[in-house]
Amino acid sequence: MKDSRILLTYHDLTVEVESSPNEELLQHMHQTLMGQPGGFRYHHTNLEERMKSGKENYFMYLRKSGKMMGSVGFCGKHAVTAGLAHDSWLIRYFSIKAPLRAVPKKRKTKADLKDENKRSGVLGRFIQPVFADPAQLRDGVKGSEQPSIIFAIIDQTNLRSMNFSSQMGLETVGTMAGFSFSRMRPRRSERIEQIANPEKEVILNQIGEYYKEYSLFYSESIFKNDDYYMIKEGGRMVAGVQIYPVHWKIVDFGGKVANGAMKLLTRIPWVRKRISLEKLSFLALDAIYCEPGYESVLYELMEGVLERTGNYMAMLMVDESSDLYGIFRDRKKLGILHKVLGTYNADIRVRFIQIPEDVRNHFFNNPIYIPTYDNS
């Protein structure tokens, strides 16, 4: 579907949907300042590939007299949770060109939302029907009985998005930690191997077994560009990681202390050659694999991959309830940039649609797989 399709109209307001991002949206997203005031803030500079990745993407636009006021992307994937096959829709690239309301000062309670829903704003009235029945994104037909979830990763300090997600029926099922791993002088590892075609099935089975208790694990982007790296012992992978390059234009490192620390660091000549105050290039890490007892090998692998690819920093996003997060929480040694940038905390928010209670409980009681590629 190349042409836009109108889902809803109201006077001079329309909601349109397209299956690929148009030039207007790409330009808008590159101009959009990500992050929250007082925190880390940046512009994306290489979004196009990720916005077009995946087998099912829909981009919804709110327009007033033909002018785009806001947008939201839905990345659709088929999933199986606790034996139930269902759709999963990841919300990405939610952006408003101009504030439709004053910036909130607190996180809304259920009582606040009950009153607010009675006088739902323009944005809420227009998007709510799609959040209640996302399958209509495919063909515009309402009334689908397809079990599905809508989910989003929302910065805990982003009160506007947090409150809007509550109004749209999303609730928190877990929390995510996003953090950096850096080495200014990464050491080479001769043990690192890059994935080869004959072993992909075996390695994918290992990764799948590692994440079998997670909700929303999917393997679609694993082995992209054959950029899966691993260390083996006795012929078996004991540590592995998928990498993707990411580039940001930095506006703020997160307040006076962080900005001051980065200025001091980049005065050191050998640091300045590696890290810029204006641009930040790093690796997003996904499908991380670590057999118990091989935590030091995982660190060796991540550092060795930085050295091999000419990078100095990687970004990870992990459910805080997972054993994987426990490795980094307990072992620490995440590098100097982590000391400056700290940890980014976000809520994992889900809206359940036609989902039985036992399957809902699985989301609350098990870690969620967080694809850094989709969220960085």
Image: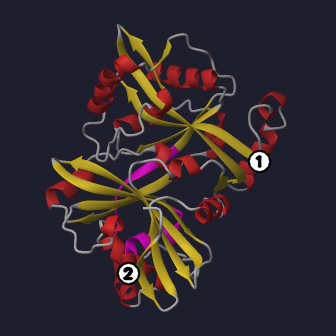
Q: Which residues are magenta?
A: 156-178
Q: Position of residue 192 (x, y in %)?
A: 50, 15
User: Of the residues under marks 1 and 2, which one precedes in the sequence?
Assistant: 2
Expressed as whole percent of the image width and height from the top left, the position of residue 102 reads 58, 82
**Which element type, helix, strand or loop, lies under badge 1?**
loop
Q: Which residue is mark 1?
A: 278
Q: Quadrant of the N terminus?
A: bottom left
Q: Tell whether position 171 is magenta.
A: yes
Against 315, residue 209 (above or below) is above
Residue 113: mark in rendering: 2
As drawn, 106 above or below 46: below
How many angstroms separate mark 1 from mark 2 (CA)? 40 Å
Q: Is residue 357 left or right of residue 321?
A: left
Q: How is the image coloured?
A: secondary structure
The residue under the point 41% across, 76% down is 127
Q: Indicate which label's residue lies in the foreground, 1 or 2.
A: 1
Residue farthest to the top? Answer: 234
